[in-house]
Image (tube, helix red, strand yellow):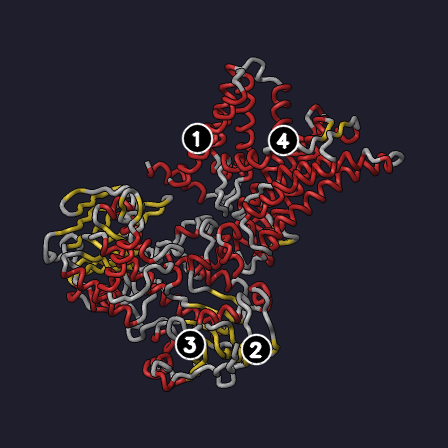
Amino acid sequence: MTAPTSAPPAPSGPLLLDMQHIQKAFAGVTALDNASLGVAAGEVHALIGQNGAGKSTMIKVLTGAYRRDGGSITFAGQPVDFASPLAAQRGGIATIYQEVNLVPLRTVAENIFLGREPRKWGLIQWPAMNAEAARLLTELGIQLDVKEPLGSFSTAIQQMVALARAVSINARLVIMDEPTSSLNEREVETLFGVIRGLKARGVSVIFVSHRLDELYAVCDRITVMRDGRTVYAGDMQGISRLQLVEQMLGREIKNAGAQTGFVKHKGSAGAKPLLGVGGVVRGTRLQGASVEVGEGEVVGLAGLLGSGRSELARVIFGADQPDAGELRFGGQPVQFRSPSDAIKAGLGFCSEDRKAEGIVPELSVRENLTLALLPRLSRAGVVDNRQQAEIVERFVASLGIKTSNPDQPIRELSGGNQQKVLLARWLAMNPKLLILDEPTRGIDVGAKAEIQRLIGELAQEGLGVLMISSELEELIEGCQHVTVLHDGKTVANLAGDEISEAQLLHAMAQGLEPEDMPRPPTPPQVRA
Amino acid sequence: MSGEINTAARPARSGSGGQGLLADLKQVLPSILILLALLIFNAFFTPYFLSVQTLNVNLTQVATIIIVAMGMTLVIATGGVDLSVGSLMAISGVLAPLIFLNPAFASLQGLGIALAFVVPVLVAGAFGVLNGLFVTRLKLQPIVATLVLYIAGRGIAQVITNGQLQSFTTPAFTYIGLGRPFGVPFQVILMLIIVALTYWVVKRTVFGRYVLAVGGNETAAGLSGVPVSRVKLAVYAISGLLAGIAGLIVIAINSSSDANQVGQGMELDAIAAVAVGGTLLSGGRAQVLGTLFGALIIQLIRFTLLAKGVPDAAALVVKAAIIVIAVALQQRRRRE
């Protein structure tokens, strides 16, 4: 079943993109080793692999963000060597990155036409630009005011704007790096519609995703990478899911039955209460949210985008102050004025946005890992280097963090390894409660399972975990309780067998019908 | 080409810490090379360059810039900037003679001198705290926040003295500018101590890591329990204190204090030293040794041009050009 790389099945048409023997190393660590990627015209090509397998590097080499050390790239029949992503864009390759790289303060229309605004006499033609932007978005099934700043829209919308931008430059190849990670189901459908539209126009798409369902739904062919090499290339329908995951991991999976790495332990019925949150109100985003976590429990916090999950986590951690509501921790009423108060009490918080709120990119793995621990690692303000090195070494080994050395800047690590460092940042503190916001988002299957297993083990040792997740499998297989938020309000508390896909979806979707919607009390009429 | 770089970067792995003095020097290699080039050029083409006297002249002149630039390095590492340092030097510079020349201390000269050292520096430090409060409480952008005292500070200094020049001959005070223990100018010793201390703070203390974390990603630092506001307040306070010290040295060298002149243009010299030294102006890094070399480079350029008889106006242009080259070299190195 394993198709050797040397003889990939012939693609349906002539190759639009042909990357061969690509070599790339960073500071002595090989990132790409004889990697190859071939994409035919008008095909949707899946590119998958674990974090650190080299997908992102491959894409950055293609678009000129990185210089390759060796190998050849042929695009549309010409050997190419793009000096920058801008050059690649001019050459017909548009890239939509995982984190949308647009300018939040400028309008939607400006973002779509950034760098190539329609001009006359050197002046931007605003009406023409706005009209064209609106037309492009309508084609993608989105209606919005293109004169609003991009930053005022959700990530999902921003992604669609990025896509509209790609479409509008008449790209021959569109690269999408995990485009669906922040989209809901309907938006994913819209996106797939757009992708099929692109395909019909003869545009090729490279689709990077960790969600296997999506690959089978939309892709024609697939390239699997592992450890910087291309280990499989072939038709999407010619490989089963299990084979695919095996190729990615390079080994056979033991528990092929379970979908996550969780080993759920039966939480003792009378778990000692650790965290109790009741009736939290903050602005319009939280309208009476409650959740309880017992010692040694993994409690899921579910809800759709914008349901207030992350906002609740920030309030619990003291990053935001609630307008109303009560917080009890370890049996005592508490009010954390700042994250450092919460940390002192024994809380830890891994934010959903690793890049913006987790890592300090310029600092090393070592400094990032011990950032929260520093006060305990020091005497009279001076850091104990030896103790610091010991702790870092221990966590790098126990969590399997892949880094060339602890002094490597964390920005050079793959997403999964960055996430492990951030987990270690809190585990080193020996916390009582860990709040994890989407702990496995954007992480490859292997690292994901490892992190999930780790969460389960930690809970077994008595750690309370409050886990925000959009993945139903994670909630179903990993949590003893699941609290569901809707519009900033707790609408359901599920336990045991109640935690099923049907129940979760039902609870999360609650209020979609107007008559079911729990309305906030109408404020008394005030007449001016 | 990148292959060479890879192999060059590898040895860092072998060292257990990997972050020793040598590694830090390597990071600021371009500024060291430029400095060496300037030294060699002068050794050949400037008569009497290789003399203790030339060394002392140069070090004496650059000491205050370096002292102020140490504070600036910390401020810039948090992603800020401090434009008020020159004005704070002026305030400190006019306060000191007011104290030790005050008739009230005529019979207690020792106390007067002691207070003249301590009070002006603390006042400058307090103004630094004010800068910090503008940044942390009022959430002003650092460049705007410190512009306030850049403008007002010199005004305050002039108001204190009615704009009059204060001259003095007080050996006990002027020692910090003119004294030469073991033949080394006193302010050079002070400068070296401050550089060593700053280097140590950045490398070894929790505060140093916090400075880099705040500059590198303020949100992440805050969520990890780093007291972001206190760290910022502290760097502006330190910058103020160091400016206060520099102000005292300047008036001691001149044996006079002119509110209009003390620290004039110092903020730009200090920022230039930091930039030439390879510290990112966007924060998250602090090349303490780089700043030291950066200041030396700027000083040596000034000296060389002067020694060659280049007119002052032309010298400024050459100075700017060399700063651009140095910063560009640092940038290119970073991107590789």
Where does label 2 land, which residue?
A326
> In 3D space, how far apart are the residues under numbered discs 4 and 3 (Cα atoms)?
61 Å
User: For the residue labelled by badge 1, is the local secondary structure a helix, a strand or a loop?
Assistant: helix
> In 3D space, how far apart are the residues under numbered discs 2 and 1 (Cα atoms)?
59 Å
Label whose residue precedes the other's in the sequence (3 or 2): 2
User: For the residue labelled by badge 4, is the local secondary structure a helix, a strand or a loop?
Assistant: helix
User: For the residue labelled by badge 2, is the local secondary structure a helix, a strand or a loop?
Assistant: strand
Q: Determine which of the numbered discs, if any, sits on residue B63 in the image.
A: 4
Q: Determine which of the numbered discs, if any, sits on residue A270 in the image.
A: none
Q: Chain of mark 3?
A: A
Q: Chain of mark 1?
A: B
Disc 3 with disc 2 on a shared chain: yes
Q: Position of residue B26 (x, y in %)?
A: 47, 36
Q: Chain of mark 2?
A: A
The amino acid type of the residue labelled 4 equals: Ala
> In 3D space, how far apart are the residues under numbered discs 1 and 4 (Cα atoms)?
23 Å
Q: Residue furthest right?
A: B107
Q: Determine which of the numbered discs, if any, sits on residue A487 in the image.
A: 3
4 or 3: mark nearer the eye = 3
Instruction: Evaluate whether residue B105 shows in this view.
Output: yes
